[in-house]
Amino acid sequence: MARDKNEAIIQYLLQCQQIQNSPLYFNFVNAKDNTNQILTTAEDSIFGETYVDGSTLRRYTFTIVTFQSITENAVVKDGQHPNENVEDLQSFQSLIDWIAEQSNKHNYPDFGDGYIIDDVSTTTAMPRLDGVNTEVTPQLAMYSVDIVIDYLDITNTVWL
């Protein structure tokens, strides 16, 4: 039986320590330090052609957004003092690295019967900084990455 793809990606992401240790929202966010949001991009489309047997290669895309407090402090040049902004970027990078690791292990979301996951990947190797909100305390940086799931939909397969 097919599962709701959104529920499947939530369960999948909850395996990641970065996601487990902070609030996770779906298409809504209470933007505070260390909160994460799954943002659907309304993209679950045929990726390629329909095969002779009726199966289709499809692509499901969504975005993970994280909010992290940010500092106005300059980088201390002595190398002894970490910079909060660098640490936050590295923290979000761990989610991207986790996705790559899961893909290498073939640990994918479970879309249920009729769907065979081919790959899960991010569209960039690093998080992107989408903006900084200086009107809240603490000030928040918004980092994001798009995640792509390529899968084979065999629900309409007609055997010849």
Image: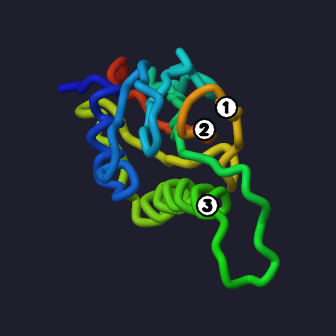
Give the image location of residue 128, x and y in percent: 70, 43
* Label 2: element kind: loop
Residues marked 3 and 2 touching at CB (< 8 Å): no
* Label 3: element kind: helix
On residue 134, which mark appears? 1
Give the image location of residue 111, x and y in percent: 30, 34
Mark 1 neighbour class, 10 Å CA radius: few under 14, some 14 to 19, many 20 or more: few
For the point 62% across and 47% down, the residue is 70
Q: Earlier in the sequence, mark 3 or mark 2?
A: 3
In which quadrant of the rendered image does the N terminus lie? top left
Q: Of residues 76 and 127, which is closer to you in this image?
A: 76
On residue 139, which mark appears? 2
* CA distance for labels 3 and 1: 16 Å
Number of numbered labels in the structure image: 3
The residue labelled by disc 3 is 84
* CA distance for labels 1 and 2: 5 Å
Mark 2 neighbour class, 10 Å CA radius: few under 14, some 14 to 19, many 20 or more: some
